[in-house]
Amino acid sequence: MADVQTISNLRQKTQKEILKKANVIGVGVGRKETAGKKAEELSLKVFVQEKVAVSALLSKDLIPKEIDGISTDVTAVGEIYSFQNPQSRHRPAMPGISIGHYAISAGTFGAVVRDATTNERLILSNNHVLANSNSAAKGDTILQPGRADGGKDPQDRIADLERFVKINWKDGGGDDNCPIATFFESLLNLFAALTGSGTRLKQVRANAINLIDAAVAKPVNNEIIEDQILKIGAVSGTAEAAIGMTVKKSGRTTGYTEGVINTLDATVEVSYGSTTAIFEQQIFTNYMSDPGDSGSLIVSEDNKAVGLLFAGSSTVTVINPIAAVLAGLNIVI
């Protein structure tokens, strides 16, 4: 049986050619594994992102079962990332890191999406991250990292606010009331007060329910952002949420985490500090996020977009369905 030095010598001699093969990302010395169990035999380890059927590979990309009489062992390890700090400044910037409107603390750069009309690349996150909870205007500066992580304008400007879906507050704050209805509401309430009646009228706001907390920003140039999410990789397409589905995210505060969807079609009241908003058709997972993770894209095990994280507690994470986000902002993934 070959020893470590012998196999290391073989590694040095062969690694250049092995690393040229499709899907191969590394080579080393280690114990051979069969069905998850390590054998005593040492082997030349060939690391791939994922195992591919032999029939799907070209002959030049096949790893021989042994080289110079030494066994090889192909092992899938996924994509290997550097331990990047999601709260630091990154250029190009990738989804999964700190970002925010210049007037807020910080949230998460969720994903790179495209405008469904112009096909322009855009940055996706929450309204309360990119649009300061309805208080922003188109063209406002977006910083990476967010202000809480040291971001400053103009040196850390990465994008400008493009558009957002307005959040309707439970108490009506920020709603555009009908002026005629407001006039009669005031007149009748004045009459009620003069006659000693305790009854008061209040407009019923049909739009007080929300589906999404979402916004997009336009990067200052195409080269300043990249598509792959930190510690997750490329996202392709969408998937409908299902109870029991395992999902994952990469966020500014808690980094990469996984969770399981346990509730669909939820109506929930969400606090925004000084006011609250009611959301319908929401998705719940177990706890998988903290403040600052808002805006993270929630994806399935096979990297399909499932929803947009926007709220949570010490026991649950709350997510907007991805179909509503795409429709509401006129974007595609």
Image: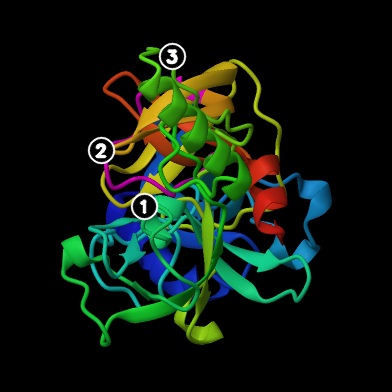
Answer with mark 1 or mark 2, whichever residue precedes in sequence: 1
Q: Which mark is nearer the camera, 1 or 2?
A: 2
Q: Which mark is residue 273?
A: 2
Residue 47 at x, y = what percent?
Answer: 49, 53
74, above or below 130, in the image? above
Which portion, as a residue range, is magenta?
Answer: 284-300
The amino acid type of the residue labelled 2 equals Gly
For the point 34% across and 63% down, the residue is 99
- Viewer-nearest residue: 1 or 300: 300
For the point 41% across and 65% down, the residue is 136
208, above or below 111, in the image? above
The amino acid type of the residue labelled 1 equals Val
Q: Which mark is residue 29?
A: 1
Residue lying farthest to the front in this orientation:
195
Q: Marks 3 and 2, how far apart in space?
A: 30 Å
332, above or below 16, in the image? above
Residue 148 visible at all: yes
For the point 26% across and 73% down, the residue is 89
Q: Which mark is nearer the camera, 3 or 2?
A: 3
Q: Quadrant of the C terminus?
A: bottom right
Residue 300 visible at all: no
- Confirm or deny contact between disc 3 and disc 2 (CB under 8 A): no
Q: Is residue 243 magenta?
A: no
Q: Which mark is nearer the camera, 3 or 1?
A: 3
